[in-house]
Amino acid sequence: MTAGEDIAVRRKKLRYRAWHRGTREMDLVLGPFADAHTEAMNTAGLDRLEALMSEEDPPLLTWVMGQVVPPDHIDREFLAEVIADHQARLAK
């Protein structure tokens, strides 16, 4: 497999994982985001998405909903991108 094939497989796996989180609410936040953005992401971007997706759904949902401030280890800039993407979809 070439590097291009490796990243294509990784993108496909991340999109699948984004839609199959375990809670429908997070599926509807992360799935559309992954569909819209993973093709344009480089390895660093995929790393950021993967790190966010490694978090458990209940706390992640509270961060997305603005109910709780995320802990310091969370990439808040990237989380803000995910939240803005979700809010833009809701506004349509």
Image (spheres, rainbow, N blue to C red):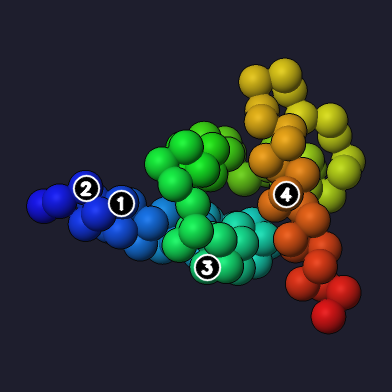
Q: Residue furthest bottom?
A: 92
Image position of 53 with respect to 23: above or below = above
User: Which residue is tagged 3?
Assistant: 35
Structural crowding at the residue carrying mark 2, measured as other residues with C-alpha within 10 Å and reported as few (<14), some (14–19) or many (≥20): few
Q: Which residue is mark 1?
A: 7
Amino acid residing under circle 4: Glu
Q: Is residue 6 left or right of residue 56?
A: left
- Please provide percent x and percent y for residue 35: 52, 68
**Mark-to-mark CA distance, 3 and 4:** 14 Å
Task: Where is residue 30? Give x, y as percent.
Answer: 60, 58
The disc, 3 or 2, on the residue closer to the chain's N-terminal end is 2
SS assignment at label 1: helix
Considering only order in the chain, which callout, 2 or 4, is on the residue closer to the N terminus? 2
Q: Residues within 10 Å of mark 1 (few under 14, many from 20)?
A: some
Is mark 3 in CB contact (under 8 Å) with mark 1?
A: no
Q: Amino acid at mark 2?
A: Ala
Which amino acid, mark 3?
A: Asp
The location of residue 65, given as percent across then percent down, is: 83, 49
Q: Nearer the viewer, mark 3 or mark 1?
A: 1
Question: What crowding class fits label 4: few (fewer than 14 Cα within 10 Å), some (14-19), or many (20 or more)?
Answer: few
Which residue, given by chain and number where applicable, does mark 4 sit on?
A: 81
Q: Is residue 3 left or right of residue 66?
A: left
Q: Residue at x 71, y 42 (%)?
A: 79
Q: Which mark is residue 3?
A: 2
For marks 1 and 4 on the same chain, the one whose residue lies earlier in the sequence:
1
Where residue 4 sits, quadrant-wise, is bottom left
